[in-house]
Structures are given as C-alpha cells and as structure tokens.
Image (cartoon, rainbow, N blue to C red):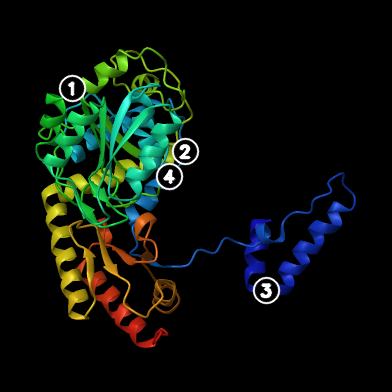
Amino acid sequence: MLAAAQAASTTPALWAQLLGTARRAMATSLLRVCPPGELLRPLAVPERLLLGPGPSNVPRRIRAAGAAQLLGHMHPEVLQVMDEIKAGIQYAFQTRNRLSLALSGSGHCAMEAALLNLLERGDTVLVAINGIWGQRAAEIARRLGANVCELLKPPGQYFTPQDIEQGLVQHKPLVLFITHGESSTGVLQPLEGLGELCHRHGCLLLVDAVASLGGAPIFMDQQEIDVLYSGSQKVLNVPPGTAPISFSERAREKLLRRKTKPPSYYLDMSCLANYWGCDGEPRRYHHTAPINSFFSLREGLALLAERGLESSWERHRANCSLLCQGLLGMGLELFKARLPTITTVRVPEGYSWKDITAFLMDKHGVEIAGGLGPTAGKVLRIGLMGCNSTRDNVERVLGALRDALQRCPRSRL
C-alpha cells in the first residue's frame, strides 16, 4: 500500500486507480466511511526556515534521535536516557535540585504543572503581567480556585524590584509568577534579587523561561528561583512535546505539605518524581512516556552542553544585536529588543503584518510571526534560537524583509 501511494504521488492516474480500488472494496464490506483519499497520498512537508517565536528548525542529529527504534518506557536504556536528561536540565538551569525532570507535554503543560502543584484552592498567587504569558498564568490559577492578584505593566516594560516588593507587601501571596522571556512583547525580565525578595516575604518564586532558556543567562540556584520551567522547541531545537521543569527544596517541601492532592494525576509531581527517579524510591509506572521525544530532548541538551551555556548566551546576544542593527538601518522601529532570542519590531506604517509574513513565507520560505495577545496586529516577531541563531540567517531574514517592504502593498491612508 505504501509503495503504491508513493507511486501515486508522481502518477495521478495511479493514485486515482488506488483510490478506486479502495472504494470498490468498500462495496463488499460493512464499512460505510471510505478511506480518506488524502491519507492515501504520501506525506509532504515543505522545507522552511523557522524564524518565528518557535518552534525552530531541528538539526539532523536531533531528528535522527527521534527516528530511532522505539524501546519500552521502563527499559533500563530508557531510564538511563531519562537520568541523562535530568543532568542536562540541571546544567541548563544551573541547579542542583533533585526534583528536575521533563514533562511529557509542551512548555504550556509545564506552566499548568507548576501552578497546579504549588497552588490549592484559596491560596493567593501574585501574577506579574506584561504580556500574554502572565495573562495565561492568571487564567490557569483562577481555574484552580486560587485567589489571583495581578501586578500590571504595559507590554514592552519589565518589573523592578520595587514593583515586586510593593505587590508582595500588599497581597502577601504564597507564589509569585513572572515571565523571564516574554515572547509576545520581546522583553527580558531581570531576575537578580527577586528570589531573595520573595523569600523575605514568605513567597515562592515561579519563573517561566520557555523563550529564554539557553539564550539568556539564568542561574536557578544563585537567583533563588523556586520553580523554573521551559519548553523544548526553542533554543534546544527539539520538536515540541517535552518540557524541562525543576523544583527547589523549598518548593518541594511545599508539595509535601499540601492538604489536598493536585487536581491532575498526570501532572502530579510526587508521581512524576518517582517515575523519574528523583525520590530515591524504586521507579514505578506512571504513564507511557513519549520515548522518542525523550531521545530528541537528550540530544538537544547534549548539544547545549557540548557548545557550552556561556557560548550559547553570547551567540544569541551577538546575532540579536546584528539583527537589530539591520532593522534600524532599514528604518524600522524596534518595539523592544532586550530578549536575545525573539526580537519584536513595529509593523511599518501603512503595511499589513499579514501581507509581510505571508510574503516571506511564500517568496522566501522564511517564517516570522505577527504579535500575540497585547501585541497582536502591532509587531512582527523574529526568532533566532539555537541552531537558527546565525549570521547567515540574520542576513537572510533582513534581505527577505527588504524585498517585502518593496513589493507588499502599502496603504496611503
């Protein structure tokens, strides 16, 4: 069947014959829904350079790991890979936390896991909101029955220690949620002193680093961060679907003092800690993990370790600076340029962001994105992450943008 489908991709007559055969077979069976014609064609995936806010392109080595032969999720070889992933997460986060593991889900899954494990109904959480991810965290916390207090900044601005302390004094939260790399606005949030400030006020610090891990310095232990999470699809260049997360001993003690069990069995950190070998007990089955995704994540973390964190930080900083210089040289206005992995630029007056992004995709095979949440319709977002953060890619996207500004329609109103 596969061979016939492959032949059909180059010979329309053969494809029609294949579909006709399948439908004639239906006439003699009890089935009433025909095999979908589109599924009888071979899968076709175009080649594109993904320079949006994520996902990013996947290197050959990581793709090969994801295509390796499947093993059982409790096989010793898989458990060894999981141990290596834990070590890689500790390196990437710069932490010695025992409770460090990868969730079987995206970075958004890690956000939910962090909040639902830390918070119980009626607990107070202070959410720092300067983009969509703070808004999303507040929504999740409300669904958990938490008392949500919001600390607000306009999109494009970050929070000062004075802002944070004022919120801590006023609301006395159990948890402070803050986004390190706000991918919807392009802001990098300084973290220095926030952990010590939270602990002084009896609060846990929860940090979203999905857009910044590997691209901007972060030191979980030194910065006294209690819970830190990220995703796989940005700087790590791994397909979406796995999410590194780490809990400090202080946060782990909070989990042990819960009055009620977390509302999700799948994301219950006490169960996951055992499956990942973080609690010193014999490992027990929890869920059937995405084995080949773990292989890919292992290789993504291995590449980061081989190249070195400091080298990764510097490469992202340098290429972001080069991109910003080129954008300014074209007369474009940066919205905010502090996040070295994702640069936000205002949509030029008279242009439609949809026209620009569609032109780059159709004519140059390059993806960039429009705004998200509070920046929707206002900005273009250009990502340079992991293997995509290169001088050649900077030049390619700048050239594509110049072409778009010359050829896309522009309103005179």
Amino acid tagged 4: Ala
Q: Nearer the viewer, residue 143 or 405?
A: 143
Amino acid tagged 3: Thr
Q: Earlier in the sequence, mark 4 or mark 1?
A: 4
Amino acid tagged 2: Leu
Tell me the quarter of the picture where residue 1 sits.
bottom right
Whole-number angstrom distance, CA of label 2 to CA of label 1: 46 Å
Amino acid tagged 1: Gly
Q: Nearer the viewer, residue 327 or 15?
A: 327
Q: Position of residue 361 (x, y in %)?
A: 42, 72
Number of residues whose C-alpha sits closer than 10 Å to that of mark 2, classed few (under 14), some (14–19) or many (20 or more):
few
Which label was assigned to residue 68? 4
Which residue is found at the position 21% from the left and 48% from the top?
Answer: 214
Number of residues whose C-alpha sits closer than 10 Å to that of mark 3, classed few (under 14), some (14–19) or many (20 or more):
few
Which residue is found at the position 9% from the left and 36% from the top?
Answer: 193
Q: Label 1 belongs to which residue?
A: 202
User: Is residue 401 left or right of 98 when viewed as pictured?
Assistant: right
**Labels 1, 3: front one:** 1
The reply to whether dot 2 and dot 4 touch (C-beta < 8 Å) is yes
Whole-number angstrom distance, CA of label 1 to CA of label 3: 69 Å
Q: Label 3 belongs to which residue?
A: 11
Q: Earlier in the sequence, mark 1 or mark 3?
A: 3
Number of residues whose C-alpha sits closer than 10 Å to that of mark 4, classed few (under 14), some (14–19) or many (20 or more):
few
Element type where label 4 sits in the image? loop
Q: Label 2 belongs to which residue?
A: 70
User: Is residue 130 left or right of 355 when viewed as pictured?
Assistant: left
Q: Earlier in the sequence, mark 2 or mark 1?
A: 2
Q: Position of residue 38 (x, y in %)?
A: 67, 61
Does residue 118 appear in this view? Answer: yes
